[in-house]
Amino acid sequence: MFNMGEIREKWEELGFLKDLPEHLKNVVALKFETLTICILNNDDYIDNTTLTNIVFPIVHEIYRKGGSIGEVKDFIIQLDEWFIENRQIVSDLNLTNNIDAESNLCTLFVEHWKSEKRIEPLKWVNKHKL
């Protein structure tokens, strides 16, 4: 079904495996391939354009920092739930000048990610994380 050599080559050519240790490149390439299939074939668990834009950088960063993800569909659902729970933060970041909201969301999610565990919503007061 999957040709690992072709999958890795595709994601390397796109630059998505840059800065990853050699021993993780096949793992992450396969996760990216599975993410793509989930996103393209989903029918009910992901309908957020921003989410589909940030899921790849988030997965890259989780692995780059030594983390991992389990089942891709479960990960996407959890990311979507986290995104919804933190909707006010998204709104606040979008209103702040010179802030790349998507980049900040990626960073926040990766900082709070613990494989296979629930991530709690962030707590903010006056646009500062507690």
Image (tube, rainbow, N blue to C red):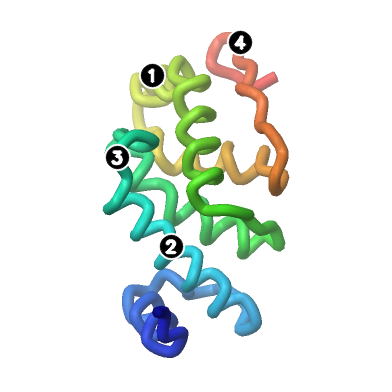
The amino acid at mark 1 is: Ser
Query: Whole-Å distance between the Cαs marked 3 and 4?
Result: 36 Å
Tell me the residue at 45%/55% (across/down).
57
Pinpoint residue 16: horizontal percent, then vertical percent.
42, 69
Above or below, comparing residue 78 to residue 23 in the picture: above
Please state which of the two labelled residues, at mark 3 or mark 1, is closer to the viewer: 3
Label 1 and label 2: CA atoms lie apart by 30 Å
Front residue of 95 and 30: 30
Residue under label 2: 34
Nearer to us: label 4 or label 1: 1
Q: Nearer the viewer, residue 75 or 124?
A: 75
The quadrant holding residue 12 is: bottom left
Quadrant containing the C terminus in the rendered view: top right
The amino acid on which the numbered mark 3 sits, given as a three-letter code, is: Asp
**Amino acid identity at mark 2:** Thr
Q: Which mark is residue 91?
A: 1
* Callouts 3 and 4 close, C-beta under 8 Å: no
Q: Amino acid at mark 4?
A: Val
| Foreground label between 3 and 2 | 3
- Sequence-earlier tag: 3 or 2: 2
The residue that mark 3 highlights is 43
Q: Which residue is mark 4?
A: 125
How dense is the environment of label 1, judged by Cα within 10 Å: few (below 14), some, or many (20 and up)? few
